[in-house]
Structure formats: C-alpha cells, structure tokens
Amino acid sequence: MRRKLLIVSAILLAALILSGCTGAIAWPGLSATDKAAVLANTNAVYGVDLNGGNLVWRFSGEGGGFLNTNRSLFITTPVITEDGLVIVMDSSSKHVIYALDPKDLRENVPNIKWRFSEAKGLWIAPSLIVGDRLFAPNSDGKVYVLDLQDGQSEKQAIKVIPVSQEQGAEDRLWGQPVTDGERLFITSLDKSVIPIDLASYDILWHADLGGAVPGGAVLGGDGMLYVGSLAKQLERFDPVTGKHEPVLKDGTKGWIWGTPIADGDNLYFGDVEGYFYSYNTAEKKLNFAPLKIDDAITASPLILGDKVLIATESGNIYAVDAQGKSVLWYGVEKGKAYTTPILAGGRVLVAYLESDYYLIALDEEGRSAWTFAGK
Amino acid sequence: MKNPANQPPAQRPELPQFNPRETFKTIAVIAVLVLAFMNFPYVINLIVNILIFIYRLVGQSFGIAIILLTVLIRLVTWPLNAQQLKGAKAMQDLQTDKDWLAIQKKYAKDREKLASEQMRLYREKGINPFGSCLPTLIQFPILFALIPSITYAIGSTPLSILKLSKSLETFGLQDVVSLIPLNSKFLGVDLGLPERTLLFGLSIPLLALTVALTTYVQTKLTMPPSGGPNDQAASTSRMMSLYMPVMLFMFPVNYASGLSIYFVASNVLSIVQYALMGRVNWRNLLPGGKKS
C-alpha cells in the first residue's frame, strides 16, 4: 500500500514539475529611484543598489490568505513619485496598490505609506503620475484616480466605456496612459484609444483600431498621438478630434506590443516578428526599411547616446544607429528580455526572465557591471 | 559439511510466457508516453488549439469550453478507462479467489516461488497485472499538458497572450487577432487566476474546495467493496479517498482557476462513466454503508 501511495505521490509531483515547464506567467517590471533599481519580479519587489547590485530592500506583499497560498504577484512596472515613494501593484487576486517608502525601512522591508484595494481586476498597466494624482488603469476596465498623499481621496473611479464589447470580452487596460497636460490617453485590449479630460474626467472621443492595444500611446514631436496595435499598424491620431489614419502603407510585419518611444521627430518601435522601425514624423516616412533584428520585440527601445538599444525575446540586446545598422551590443546564452531596459545611475539595466539572474547592469559599452540574482 | 551433490537442484522461477498481444500493448503505451513527453510543447499546442476552437464554437466562454474539452477527453479516453476498470475489477476479484488465497498461504515464506505462482495464475485466468495501470499512465501526458494549456489559452497576462499566439501559429488555423481580448470570466470568476472568495474577512479558495469535495465524492462512490480486513485494494482505495482530494486541492489553489473547472467536470464525468458501467457504489456515501 505504501508503494502505491508513493507512486501516486510521485506522479502528482511529476505533474507539478511538468506543469512548471510552462515557466513564468509574466515578465518583470523595472524602474529606478536615484539610488536603487526597483524590480517587480513575480512574488517580490526588490530595491537593488545601483552601484553594486546589492539587495537594499525587499517587499513581498501582505498576508498569504487561506493556507498561505494567495501569494502576491508583482509584474507591473513600479512608478516612483517625486518624494521617492515607490508605487507597486499586486497583480494577484488581492488587487492592491501599495505606496512604499524605501527611506523608511524596517528589517529591509519598506514601510507601507498607503494602500488601495478597491479595484476588481488584475493590475497589468503601469500607472501614471500627473501632478498630485495617480492614474491607474485596471483590467476591470476602469481608470482609478488616487490622491498621491493617501491613495484614497479621489474615490471616483473613471469607468472607461468600451467601444466594442464584443461577445462579452472585457475592456482590459494594459498600457500605461500618456498625457499632453490636458488629456489622458488610455489604450485598451479591446482595441480602443480613449482620451479623458484631466479636469472633468469626461471621455472626449474613442476610436477602434481593429486590433488589441497591449502597450501604451506616445505623443510624437509633431504633437500627434501614435498608437501601435496587434492589427500590425501604427496609427496617427489628432489628439483633439480623434481623427486618425494608418502611418505605414504596408503596416508592420508583426504585432506592435511595446509602446513606441519618441525622440525629436523620430519614433522607434519593434514588433513581435523581431523587426525594428524608425519613423520620421515630420517627413512622414520610415528612416530606413524595417530592420530584422532577432527574436520577438515586446519591450520599448531605449535611447543611449546616438544609438537605440533593443531588447529581444532571445535575451540579446542590439544597438541600432541612425543609418539602420545593427550590432549585437550584449549577448546572452540563457534568458529572455521582454521588459523595457532603463538607464539609471549611468548604466543600462536589463531585467531577464528564465535566466540565472533577474537583473544585469551594463556599462555604456555593453559590458556587465553587476548582476542581481534575487538575494 | 553438506554434500552439494545430495541437494535437490535449485528451482528456477518460472518466467511468464510471451504474450504478443499484451507485449505489443505495453510497448505501444510506453511509445506513446515517450513520444508525448519528448514533444510536450507540441501536445500543449494541440490542446490549446482544440480549447480555443471550442471557445469560438460556443460563443467565447472559457468555462463551457473547458467543460466540453473535458467531455472530449473523457470520450477519447473512454476505452482506456473502461479497460482500466476491467483490469481493476479482475485484480480485485482475484484477491478473493480460492486459488490465489491458497498460493498466498502456501508460499508465504518463499517470495520467489510466490511470484512465479502468481504469474501462472494471471496467465491461467487471462489477467494482465498491468491492465489497470497502463491505461492510466497514457492519460498523464494529457493531464500534465492541460495545466499549461489552460493557463496559456486564457491569456490573463501579456506573456500568456504572447505564448498563446505562438501556440495558435503552430497550426495556423485560427485568427489570433480577432480573438484578443479573450473572455476569461465564467460565473464571475477570472479563470486565468487562482480563485479566492472573500467570506467573513477570509480569502477562501471556493473552487479549489469544490475540487477537493467532488474528488472525495468520486473516490468514495467508485471505491470497490471491501473483500475483508486483508483486502489491500480496498484499503488503498480508502487511503486514496483521503489523499487525492488534498493533493488535487493544491493544483487549482496555486494555478489558474480554469483548472478547477476541469477537475470538477472530470470528477462528475467519472462518476457518470462508473454509473453507466454499473460500478458506482452509492452506499459508500452513507454512514455505515461499508457493507455494500
């Protein structure tokens, strides 16, 4: 009998291990204060010293729920306030936003200055700070507006009206909002772009892109709003009227996942087929033909001096110059880079999934300065 | 000193006779298992595609799609389950067989001889001792692949949607863009996340508890009648009725709650299959129903 029980236990253990072959369920979120990299990676948020890569603080949420199984999940890009508060989102079924104060550590755990737990859906989208307000889009289709002082005051969650609520599908908000100072532009997985008046919270117009928008929008140097979608097209919007048109005659080769970035007249973005695009908004044309880089690109590019860095699913980082020449800037044997790299403390920080380390700091030549493995 | 020449020659244990049909079955099962595990991502892709196909067919409801997928898996594995039941019944009947009990008693102290006699009895009665376990084994790749399949297919996080798109592209049969966003809600629960219900200030995994309860009921109902105090099969079943609910509780409590739907549907269908084959023991659910 004992042997049979052992066999059953072994089979169930094997099931657990094999099901673990699915790997991580989400990629990490990365940002930085002036002193520390802030990495939201699965069950904890880590504050990592920018100089040496040492762990400064760690936050793993509150309470585990029934049988301690309801663990927190941190995957959303943390947001840093002017006062140095770190806003992190628990993407487990607890749906909590925490404002952490890394200047007030207790046994290397930052003090929770406030928490907000009234949302009903998953936190995926990074929030946006506008003045003293925090705009936090949630997968329940609402944008929550919180007072940065206490995380509670505003109380009036904005309901984003879905444009095409087809067959019960939800209007999940996954992209970080962007603002021109008067309006807040929200993108939605239900294929919509929705601007909200920052004073009245009224929805000004809405448009259907024909494909889900997992990333955010960007304001170009020409004052227009640019949005990429899974419909393999970059769309240009008049932010006032909502009038829009496709930017690329032939579209993109694959889905546009990461938010494009603007640098003067240029827009840079990638697609999940591994192509990189450089578009001039003044001349309304591509600076060079779509450049096949490597594996899928889900991260936004990073501008480093006169080159643009692109992280790919293969884990490699490529540098592209203004002429459209790409070189392998940092190569890996193991790991996937879905998260947008950031520049902090004079170093390029790259968060990895399925690697021996969570985070690597690279100098301006693409050489490893330090790595952080979660300890 | 004993003279070796005076000792009777050592009796060599009798080897089981070659049975081409049974051998072929065993090899086939092992081959399927090896192939499935070598191509595990392919098995996952296949299940994801079937799940998404059903999802579209039923008007984009993941809950119903998972239930129908469970029905489909049950139908496909019906002959295997039936064979497993048949094998288990034969083994169970053997426990009370007169000849079986006789050799147990006679060769209690000679394990080698006992094994050889047991093999002889298996052959005489046409029983394959692995008849109940091989069909079970072949179902494991499906179960193992279901966990990641359901997690990908529901697409609650950016990474799962990316993996889903790659999975669907493998077969190239379905337009991924039109599918997103997927409707992961079923009866108010997001099937892509571990489910928790707030009751009296406590975060309770209701669906996982339902899995545990239905597993308990299913194992109780399908528990064979006891052949006596030494009936090992019945004793194992009793233990399983306690262990299995606890073990299966741990899956949905940590993974996407869509798995709970699969386990609950699977348990209910298992009871239905046993009932259709006349193997459900309803008295096991009642207090004092052990004599059934």
Image (tube, coloured by chain):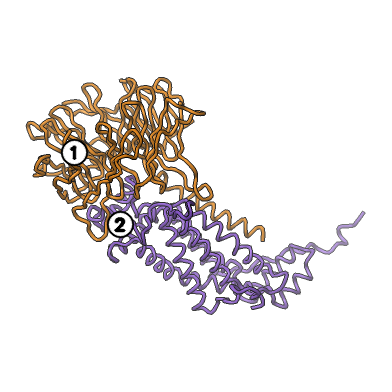
Chain colours: A orange, B purple
Residue B266 horizontal side relative to residue A76, left or right: right
Q: Label 1 neighbourhood size at 10 Å, few (<14), some (14-19), many (20+)?
A: few
Residue corresponding to mark 2: B183
Could you tell me residue B121's position as x and y percent? 67, 73
Could you tell me residue B166's position as x and y percent? 30, 49
Residue B16 visible here: yes
Question: Could you say which is closer to the camera, residue B74 or residue A227?
Answer: A227
Residue pushed farthest left? A283
Q: Amino acid at mark 2?
A: Asn
Q: Quadrant of residue B222?
A: bottom right
Could you tell me residue A28's position as x and y percent? 37, 37
Chain where mark 1 sits: A
Q: Which mark is residue B122?
A: none
Residue A137 horizontal side relative to residue B19, left or right: left
**Residue at coordinates 65% horizontally, 69% vertically from top-left?**
B234
Residue corresponding to mark 1: A199
Q: Secondary structure at mark 1?
A: loop
Q: CA distance from mark 2 to mark 1?
A: 33 Å
Residue pushed farthest right? B1
Could you tell me residue A326's position as x and y percent? 23, 29
Badge count:
2
- Give the answer, above or below, for where A339 lies relative to B271: above
Q: Label 2 neighbourhood size at 10 Å, few (<14), some (14-19), many (20+)?
A: many
Residue A4 horizontal side relative to residue A14, left or right: right
Question: Could you say which is closer to the camera, residue B82 or residue A193?
Answer: A193
Looking at the rendered structure, whether the residues under marks 2 and 1 are on a common chain is answered as no
Q: Amino acid at mark 1?
A: Ala
Chain where mark 2 sits: B
Position of the N terminus of chain A, as image quadrant, is: bottom right
